[in-house]
Image (tube, helix red, strand yellow):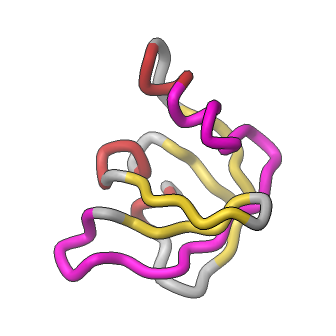
Amino acid sequence: MTLKEMKPGQSGQVLSIGESGPLKRRIMDMGITPGVAVKVIKMAPLGDPIEINVRGYELSLRKEEAARIEVQV
């Protein structure tokens, strides 16, 4: 399952980031790394952006970024 497929209120653990290059670096710079717990707080009506909680911080991700993050619910 990807972070994009999760529903608001669901929590999961990041398994991997299926991307390389600058996008992966940007995601990892936000603190989203394999093994970290994430919780989806809310989604915009059209799904962009997705608000998540990671390590006590609230972050916004674009739909295409969230689609590249595999999670285990």
Q: Nearer the viewer, residue 58 or 33?
A: 58
Identify the residue at image location x=63%, y=32%. Answer: 28
**From this viewpoint, is residue 73 visible?**
no
Does residue 67 sit above or below 24 in this rendering?
below
Quarter of the image where one finds residue 31: top right
Which residue of the protein is positioned furthest toward the front in this rendering?
Answer: 57
Identify the residue at image location x=55%, y=22%. Answer: 25
Which residue of the protein is positioned furthest toward the top in this rendering?
Answer: 21
**From this viewpoint, is residue 39 visible?**
yes
Please give the range of residues in magenta. 26-48
Asked if residue 13 lies left or right of residue 68, the reply is: right
Q: Nearer the viewer, residue 26 or 70?
A: 26
Q: Quadrant of the C terminus?
A: bottom right
Does residue 24 sit above or below 50 in this rendering?
above
Residue 43 % position (x, y)? 36, 77
Q: Is residue 15 magenta?
A: no
Residue 8 % position (x, y)? 49, 84
Identify the residue at image location x=39%, y=43%. Answer: 65
Asked if residue 43 lies left or right of residue 19, the reply is: left
Identify the residue at image location x=46%, y=12%. Answer: 21
Does residue 36 sit above or below 40 in this rendering?
above
